[in-house]
Image (cartoon, grey):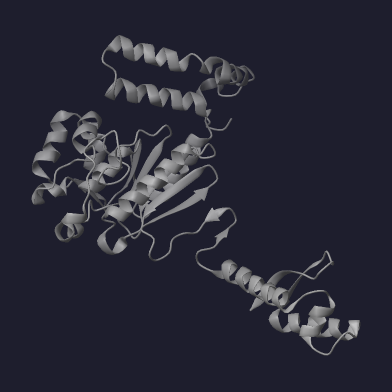
């Protein structure tokens, strides 16, 4: 066992020592000061009371415990993949990963998990230091939908906010309109409500063996987390109806052909591929990227007419000319990006 950062009274040096060395050092100090023959009196001689000495030992012990605990934070990363947490996150520079952490039930979402997912994605959207979020599931599956066991056995405690402009959705964040990109890294099952969470993302990176589908069709559970709204917009009404009416599973390649998957990667690589994509997006001028993203979403979901969609695009794009476009044009004029070469690095 090792204690670090022990600060002896007025000395400025921080000395890493073991518990045995710590008490030996106190003993040597005692002899040097000739104040007493015990560690306690030595501490008193240095104007430290018993209470202060006890507090010092407790503090040192706490620091050691925190440093070696699986809950600790190191190197700017939040290591939260621990038992008991239904949602865990990890910051990687300007990118944050948010993981559903209920692998024992294929990451099915209960009320607690829904609330935590909403909290984490809301926090991401309001944090100016973060640019892209990656949503995934721990243990080999993205999400198997809402936890039907909770629905079956705790119906009385289930509270659904029917006003979609208020409160959380059953799956948590599915009513959010994020101002920044979200990428889903899909492995294993992304079905029922899990499919709806994947639809919340701007992009879906899907592993080869992943399975997607409206599996809740078999149990009379409706799509009330945006599935009937987002899916037709993404893949067209005809294909959406195929999935919604039959509840059949589709694999990664069919999802790619439908436009439901944006990338298909080998098994075990979805999270890494999604992180690389997120980091690439993070290097672009952010105001311009977010303005274009916002305009695309408005034109699909909110614009009452083509002309108003064009107006929205102009109103939100024009201010970017001075804030980012001039600098970008200057970079281009210096030779960067000519000849069809593309680089995300500025």
- Of residue 245 and residue 119, the one placed in the foreground of this image is 119
Left or right of 295 in this view: 282: right
Total number of numbered discs in the rendering: 0
Which of the image's four quarters has the C terminus? top right
Farthest residue, direction top: 307
Residue at the image position 26 percent from the left and 59 percent from the top: 106
Location of residue 223 with respect to 338 vertically, above or below? below
Q: Position of residue 13 (x, y in %)?
A: 82, 66
Does residue 277 appear in this view? no
Does residue 200 appear in this view? yes
Left or right of 157 in this view: 275: right
Q: Quadrant of residue 301?
A: top left
Q: Position of residue 170 (x, y in %)?
A: 25, 46
Which of the image's four quarters has the N terminus? bottom right
Residue at the image position 31 percent from the left and 50 percent from the top: 114
Q: Position of residue 246 (x, y in %)?
A: 9, 43
- Of residue 200 and residue 224, the one placed in the foreground of this image is 224
Farthest residue, direction bottom: 37
Residue at the image position 32 percent from the left and 54 percent from the top: 113
Q: Quadrant of residue 8?
A: bottom right
Q: Quadrant of residue 312?
A: top left
Location of residue 244 with respect to 27 vertically, above or below? above
Q: Position of residue 125 (x, y in %)?
A: 44, 38
- Of residue 342 and residue 126, the one placed in the foreground of this image is 126
């Amino acid at each position: 066992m090792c204690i670090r950062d022990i600060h002896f009274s007025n000395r400025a040096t921080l000395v890493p020592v073991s518990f045995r060395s710590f008490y030996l050092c106190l003993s040597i100090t005692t002899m040097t000061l000739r104040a007493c023959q015990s560690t306690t009196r030595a501490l008193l001689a240095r104007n430290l009371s018993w209470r202060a000495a006890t507090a010092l030992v407790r503090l040192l012990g706490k620091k050691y415990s925190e440093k070696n605990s699986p809950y600790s934070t190191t190197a700017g990363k939040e290591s939260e993949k621990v038992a008991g947490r239904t949602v865990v996150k990890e910051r990687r520079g300007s990118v944050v990963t948010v993981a559903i952490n209920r692998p024992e039930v294929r990451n099915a979402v209960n009320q607690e998990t829904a609330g935590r997912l909403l909290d984490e994605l809301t926090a991401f959207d309001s944090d100016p230091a973060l640019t892209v979020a990656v949503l995934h599931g721990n243990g080999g599956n993205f999400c198997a939908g809402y936890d039907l066991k909770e629905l079956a056995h705790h119906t009385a405690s289930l509270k659904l906010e029917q006003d979609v402009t208020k409160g959380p959705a059953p799956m948590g964040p599915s009513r959010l309109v994020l101002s920044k990109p979200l990428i889903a890294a899909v492995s294993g099952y992304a079905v029922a409500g899990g499919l709806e969470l994947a639809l919340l993302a701007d992009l879906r990176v899907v592993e080869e063996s992943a399975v997607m589908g409206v599996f809740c069709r078999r149990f009379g559970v409706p799509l009330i987390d945006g599935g009937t709204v987002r899916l037709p917009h993404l893949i067209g009404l005809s294909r959406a109806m195929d999935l919604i009416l039959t509840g059949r599973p589709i694999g990664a390649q069919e999802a790619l052909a439908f436009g439901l998957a944006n990338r298909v990667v080998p098994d075990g690589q979805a999270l890494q591929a999604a992180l690389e994509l997120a980091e690439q997006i993070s290097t672009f001028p952010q105001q311009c990227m977010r303005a274009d993203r916002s305009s695309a979403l408005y034109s699909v979901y909110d614009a009452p007419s083509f002309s108003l969609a064009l107006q929205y695009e102009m109103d939100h794009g024009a201010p970017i000319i001075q804030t980012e476009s001039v600098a970008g044009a200057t970079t281009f004029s210096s030779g960067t990006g000519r000849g069809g070469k593309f680089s995300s690095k500025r």
